Image: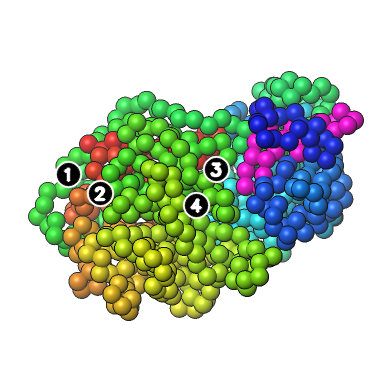
Amino acid sequence: MTAPLRAGDPSEVGGHRLLGRLGGGGLGTVFLGRSRSGRLLAVRVVAPELAADGEFRRRFEELVASARAVSSFHTAQVVDGAADGAVPWLASEYIAGPSLREAVTVHGPLPVEAVRALGSGLAEALAGVHAAGLLHGGLTPGDVILADDGPRLTDFALARLWDAAHPSRTVVAAPGGTFLAPEQVRTGTTLPASDVFALGGVLVFAATGRNAFGSASGSDALIRLVDGEPDLDGVPTELLDLVRSCLAKDPARRPPVGAVLRSLAGNPPDAWLPSAVAGMVGERKELAGVHGAARGPGRRALLLAAGAGVIGLVGVPVGVRLSTGEAPGKRTPTATPSAMDGASAPEAVRLGPATTIELGRNDTDSRSLAYSRDGKVLAVGALNKVVLIDPVARTKTGEITFDGAMGYVSALAFSPADGMLAAAYPVPSDPRSREPQAREEGRVAITLWEVAARREVLRLSCPPEGNMLAQAHTVAFSPDGRLVALGRDGRDSIGKAVVWEVSSGRQVASLPVGPGSNGSFGRAGSVVFSPDGKVLAVGYGGDLKGAVDLFDTASFAPIATLALDKTDLFGVTALAYAPDGRTLYGAYGGIAAWDTASKRLTTTLAELKSRYQSLALSPDGKMLAGAGSVDDKLVIWPLPSGRQTPVSTGRTGNRLVAFGPDGKTIATSTDTAELLAAVQIRAVA
């Protein structure tokens, strides 16, 4: 699990000799180290862009001091660290063993006695964290290492700092988001009871192999947390009442962590792990050269040490029959008015086998997806970079990195005029700057790239919105490439669409959308220009309400609002115009279609409960694809008939979808069994 040191890596940090790489991520690089006394350590060296942030160093110093005060056998002890050197660093015990997530994924649920011992150890660990005045705030099965002498809680000292340092990582996108507590989702407040809620979810995962609130992502996951009931099927009867109380919606009704510990306390057997999992522990010890009771790497080190590459999945093509028949009980939607009326919808669509392309060993999510106009490049937004893929050869061809980015490249679009790529991403505040705006939170930027030459052409900055969670969500070019528009969170509105003139870099409009002020869950989530370039449509929403505002691009005066009675948590998250401009499609949880002449809703292709978050229209306008559904399926609608055809795409599901410019391929974002971000490409015939 340890990779060799690379050129440029330090040979020692704080007097600890570095032996190899365990992994890396947004906070920095994790090394396997050895102290002067011979003790193995996991040494995290903070990323340079964070090291340059004075406020981050201050928080880091406070965290190191607090974390060293945590005293519990079941936590990975923080043994050393410094915030005042060339780069901040933190050293903790190296724990030899798999993560709980890894062990359960490979070998299935744990037996009841192991679950009891696991819960007891984690409750003790959380009690120690709370006693030191800390909160974990982000406990997931990946934060738990299974050692041969009991479970260990890792990364407890970094979870909150990670979130503070990366405001683009909202609860929607955070790994393990379905282990957050309802109050964290509603208000962003973390309490000791929030860690108890997460503990309950971890126990459900250990006992059943499933997340208590399902495997959905995005707003559907958050809604289930807040309003849904946990799936406790398979939880051992003797643990059922305790787990149910830990997962109470009201923090006041959850037991304190000490009561959880007393409920689970007992005398676990010496060999507390199943033999197969114990074998994994032995393998980790052997690989690290550990003998005796040593300890292994944290969750992110284990996941991020997994290899990256291109995996071709060979399979039988999926035949999709698009007929006029309809399953019993399915409502037939009204046909959408379009210039395609009378045109023949495809009788059948045949999807070829999927090729899965991993983005990289440090990438656990993808936020944006875009084809170039000529179809030779597929761009995917990842952590601080864009991954470039050849969709014909189905191989990864390169990356564009963003040194000034702080988080994921959350929006991408290719210019139809010259193939220039626009990439939007959050940028950190600079507390040392003399410019007041540069010191504020909520800054985002767009970089325009000439992809073929790997050359930055222009960088466009937005004024800050004063909210750490404010970020960019969507970007679009006008049909002639003259304008580029960004959808983002707003300070005094649900969201804003900001528009620039590409040739000069001059901002020409800042258009607030939605009434009231923005909270954590409001956004201008989608922008699109009409095919003639005369209208800019902006989809937005928050708190289960949303709409689409239309603006005249000559004056940027408002034209109309396309209203919806109710939407998903984030409102209208994706938009697409039909090629003739007569119909506008939008994903809002369901899929809606509006007649652009009358400004009236004409069709609902899918209902709100379906939870679609992404859609794409084929270039000829004859097929609409939806992704991010509640059942993790890619769904295709032939137009104008609108009868849906679900396509099973594997257990990992799909969150983003895009048609190639010739309509012959379709790309979706997904993840691998190792929880690494990936893209699947299929032929459409």
Q: Which residue is mark 4?
A: 409
Q: Estimate how packed mark 3 is, as few (under 14), some (14 to 19) or many (20 or more) residues with alpha carbons within 10 Å.
A: many
Q: Which residue is mark 2?
A: 618
N-terminal-most mark, 3 or 2:
3
Q: Residue at x 47, y 59 (%)?
A: 459
Measuring from the top left, give residue 553's x and y in whole percent. Answer: 30, 72
Q: Which residue is mark 1?
A: 346
Q: Which residue is mark 3?
A: 364
Residues drawn in magenta: 21-43
Give the Cα distance between marks 1 and 2.
12 Å
Measuring from the top left, give residue 106's x and y in whole percent. Answer: 59, 29
Residue furthest left as drawn: 342
- Inspect the image, locate mark 2, and give the three-letter code of the amino acid beneath it: Ser
Q: Estimate how packed mark 4 is, as few (under 14), some (14 to 19) or many (20 or more) residues with alpha carbons within 10 Å.
A: many
Give SS at disc 3.
loop
| Left or right of residue 195, residue 325 in this image | left
Q: Overall secondary structure of the magenta stretch?
A: strand
Residue furthest right as drawn: 37
Q: Residue at x 61, y 60 (%)?
A: 428
- Inspect the image, locate mark 3, and give the three-letter code of the amino acid beneath it: Thr
